[in-house]
Amino acid sequence: TIEQAQITTNICKVLKLGPDAYKDKSRFPNGSWCKEGDWVLITKYAGSRIRIEGGELRIINDDEVLAVLDDPRDILPANIL
């Protein structure tokens, strides 16, 4: 189960929001789902990947955010912590 969850989703930290993020009032009537500094859950294939300095950055669309997490450890099973 842990392996399957890791394959299907990714936890990312929001570094920057673009100027047009969440501006479509018909799709986001309550405004932004996330802000800079938030931890978000996205699907494995969301966005465009940029590999840099041994890590990976993703450029994603505003509608690719599945959830905002208070703490990324919140979704890990207890035996992992």
Image (tube, rainbow, N blue to C red):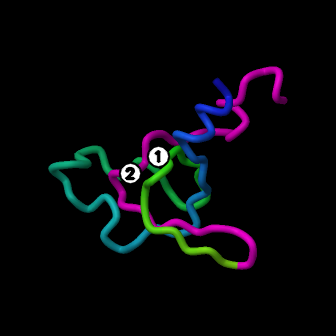
Quadrant location of the C terminus? Answer: top right
Quadrant location of the N terminus? Answer: top right
- Residue at 21% x, 48% y: name it: 27
Q: Would you say 19 lies left or right of 28 here?
A: right
Please name whichever residue, 70 or 47, is drawn nearer the observer in this view of the structure. Answer: 47
Region of the chain picked out in magenta, as a range: 53-81
Q: Would you say 1 lies left or right of 20 here?
A: right
| 16 vs 43: above or below | below
Tell me the mark number nearer the camera, choosing from 1 and 2.
1
Label 2: state its secondary structure.
Answer: helix
**Amino acid type of the residue tagged 2 in the rendering:** Glu
Please name whichever residue, 55 or 3, is drawn nearer the observer in this view of the structure. Answer: 3
- Residue at 69% x, 39% y: name it: 71
Q: Residues within 10 Å of mark 1 (few under 14, many from 20)?
A: some
Label 1: state its secondary structure.
Answer: strand
| 65 vs 80: above or below | below
Q: Position of residue 59 (x, y in %)?
A: 46, 68
**How far apart, in angstroms, are the residues tagged by discs 1 and 2?**
8 Å
Picture disc at residue 43: 1
Q: Quadrant of residue 62?
A: bottom left
| 77 vs 31: above or below | above
Please name whichever residue, 61 or 36, is drawn nearer the observer in this view of the structure. Answer: 61
Q: Quadrant of residue 72?
A: top right
Q: Position of residue 68 (x, y in %)?
A: 52, 42
Q: Position of residue 11 (x, y in %)?
A: 60, 47
Q: Which residue is mark 2?
A: 64
Q: Residues within 10 Å of mark 2 (few under 14, many from 20)?
A: some
Q: Are marks 1 and 2 in contact (CB under 8 Å)?
A: yes
**Amino acid type of the residue tagged 1 in the rendering:** Thr
Q: Position of residue 15 (x, y in %)?
A: 58, 67
* N-terminal label among 1 and 2: 1
Residue sitting farthest toward the left: 26
